[in-house]
Amino acid sequence: MVTKQEVAERAGVSTATVGRVISGKGYVSAEAREKVNAAVKELNYRTNKLASNLRKSKSNIIAVLVEDLLNPYYMHLVEAMVERAEQQDCIISMFAIKDRDVRKILDDLLSYRVCGIVNLAMFTCDFSWYDIFLEEGIRLINCTKSGPKVVVDYTEGMRQAMESFRRTGRKRPAFVAGIEEWLMPTDMRITYFQQNAEKYGFEYDSRRILCGNYPMEKAHNVGYELCRKLIASGVPFDSVFCLTDMMALGVLRALFDNGYKVPHDVSVIGCDDLDFTGFFIPALTTIQVDKKAEGYAYVDFILDEGVSEDTVRKIGTKLVERNSV
């Protein structure tokens, strides 16, 4: 590998000058800059980022914790994060959380000297050595109950979704939450539905709110099985809100398999506005999240040293109406 010293010798300048040209920081005369750039090109010099990371005591890697690698929503977020990170000369690295063995992963990330950790799991991961990460200058986003957070604000999207059900004469909406019961109070979509159902003239029945084992089980399977359970229970329903579009996919299949027509018999609304939901039959009405804005916000929070520990950035939502309502 070509070194800075070799570039300096070829250009006839000091290694400090080479460093300033490569980093873009500090004054360098136009003549010296031209010589260094020519030498870099001739020698095909590449920056040794590993050595740089070792000197800085932390790397340019942003770690992203993901539970459900099969849900395209997270892939959209990571794509946006990669785009934003490249602008800042950083790298995004995904880590799958299996069986919630978060402590070992965090311990490894501390050893890897990552510059930040973004938790996309559905639960916070409090841990006793939080202060160690702070001392090392590693920014944690959505990892603990404290610290900066990026929050998807579902209020407007849910308001529009419930108004859509009311406008089309639905009275008995079900909610396929899919997550475990202990997680339900932490999800804004579920709590909004519970707190506002009667306000929209719906017949609220807790039996129509179904929890499951997502993300330990695949979302479409959870949606399918919970919808089958709802049908078998005999509890009347005329519409279904689904926590994610992938759950809605399972719900649509379960309704079809049991002779229901959408939206004639049952209306269905999903959440996430994944790219392919417009190709469902019928095309899925869904709550849209600005996934690019969310992904960008995570990276900006990691890299902006001016962000305080109590900063919260909200990402708005809105309903995209299609044919399933």
Image: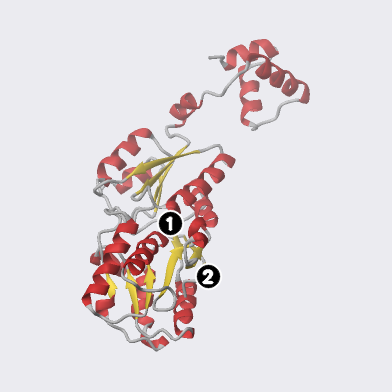
- Crowding near pointer 1: few (<14 within 10 Å), some, many (20+)? many
Amino acid type at mark 2: Arg
Q: Secondary structure at mark 1?
A: loop
Residue topped by disc 2:
322
Residue, x 61% and y 24% (percent of image)?
19
Find residue 235 and report its image quarter.
Answer: bottom left
Disc 1, disc 2: CB below 8 Å? Answer: no
The answer, for residue 185, to whether it is visible in the render is yes
On screen, residue 59 above or below 135: above
Residue topped by disc 1:
148
Which numbered disc, 1 or 2, marks the residue that appears first in the sequence? 1
On screen, residue 246 above or below 13: below
Residue, x 46% and y 26% (percent of image)?
50
The answer, for residue 123, to whether it is visible in the render is no
Residue 199 locus on image (x, y percent)? 40, 87
- Is residue 27 found left or right of 183 in the rendered image? right
Task: Work out whether residue 179 or residue 124 is closer to the camera in this orientation and state it.
Answer: 179
On screen, residue 262 above or below 142: below
Task: Work out whether residue 111 or residue 130 is closer to the camera in this orientation and state it.
Answer: 111
Task: Work out whether residue 72 or residue 235 is closer to the camera in this orientation and state it.
Answer: 235
Residue 49 is marked as none
Calculate the distance from the C-alpha at mark 1 to the C-alpha at mark 2: 35 Å
- Crowding near pointer 2: few (<14 within 10 Å), some, many (20+)? some
